[in-house]
Image (cartoon, rainbow, N blue to C red):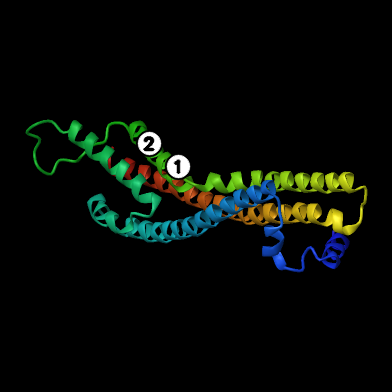
């Protein structure tokens, strides 16, 4: 590959830089480059956006779990939920809090004397409510991440298409002129190389950050599972 690049440089194909190389490319190669550039731009926008979202979600989750464990009443925890909305634990807690309140009201007969102990009838229903909320929160965290996986999987093949097209142009030029000198084959080979490079430039960051963000989401998902179990234990001790 290095030898090919050196030969092309000596032939003058790279003398004007990358912009000159793109300007000399054919319509198909330019279309491939524009498509790859769009994939890359969207991927980087998602990378920066999800990086901020996941970092904020993790920070808010740590703060929320600390407040939850120091509080003696669910109502106190519910009061600070609006300040930590980025945490997925907030959605899980609020779903559990609503279910507990509904069950307590349903189990309290009219005219029940003040100060009687509230009772939760079904821990299974509460567990299902927590699981549904955790699924909703995980789906929210994973939103747009799939585009990074698509970019990592698709763009190398899009670049490969441009590579094949450039090599076809090089062979067509050889057939048309009957000569295989550098001046004839260099434009087609340069098209092939630039589309290959662009495909890899789009795919590699997308693959790296997809795996990184998937691991961060897995950590947050584990935190939701642990919190749901902790919430159930507290309800079982105090409301059954």
Position of residue 104 in the picture relative to residue 162 (left or right): left
The numbered disc on residue 127 is 2
Q: Residue at x 60, y 44 (%)?
A: 150
Q: Which residue is mark 1?
A: 139
Q: Position of residue 172 (x, y in %)?
A: 84, 44
Residue extending farthest to the left is 111
Q: CA distance from mark 1 to mark 2?
A: 18 Å
Position of residue 12 in the picture relative to residue 79 (left or right): right
Q: Position of residue 213 (x, y in %)?
A: 55, 53
84 relative to 135, above or below: below
User: Relative to the observer, which residue lies in front, 28 or 40?
Assistant: 28
User: Relative to the observer, which residue lies in front, 121 or 86?
Assistant: 86
Q: Are marks 1 and 2 in contact (CB under 8 Å)?
A: no
* Quarter placement of the N terminus: bottom right
Q: Residue at x 68, y 55 (%)?
A: 198
Task: Bin the neighbour count of mark 2 within 10 Å (Cα to Cα): few under 14, some 14-19, many 20 and up.
Answer: some
* Quarter placement of the C terminus: top left
Q: Residue at x 81, y 44 (%)?
A: 168
């Amino acid at each position: 590959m290095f030898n090919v690049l050196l030969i092309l440089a000596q032939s003058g194909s790279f003398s004007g830089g990358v912009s000159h190389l793109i300007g000399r490319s054919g319509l198909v190669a330019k279309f491939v480059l524009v498509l790859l550039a769009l994939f890359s731009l969207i991927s980087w926008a998602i990378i920066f956006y999800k990086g901020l979202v996941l970092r904020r979600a993790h920070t808010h989750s740590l703060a929320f779990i600390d407040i939850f464990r120091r509080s003696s009443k669910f109502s106190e925890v519910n009061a600070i939920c609006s300040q930590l909305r980025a945490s997925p634990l907030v959605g899980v807690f609020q779903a559990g809090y609503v279910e507990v309140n509904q069950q307590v009201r349903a189990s309290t007969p009219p005219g029940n004397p003040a100060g009687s102990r509230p009772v939760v009838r079904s821990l299974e229903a509460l567990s299902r409510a927590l699981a549904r909320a955790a699924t909703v929160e995980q789906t929210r965290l994973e939103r747009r991440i799939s585009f990074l996986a698509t970019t990592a999987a698709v763009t190398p093949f899009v670049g490969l298409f441009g590579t094949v097209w450039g090599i076809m142009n090089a062979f067509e030029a050889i057939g048309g002129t009957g000569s295989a000198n550098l001046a004839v084959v260099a434009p087609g080979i340069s098209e092939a190389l630039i589309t290959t490079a662009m495909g890899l430039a789009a795919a590699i960051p997308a693959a790296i950050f997809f795996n990184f963000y998937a691991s961060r989401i897995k950590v947050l998902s584990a935190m939701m599972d642990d919190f749901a179990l902790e919430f159930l234990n507290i309800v079982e001790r105090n409301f059954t």
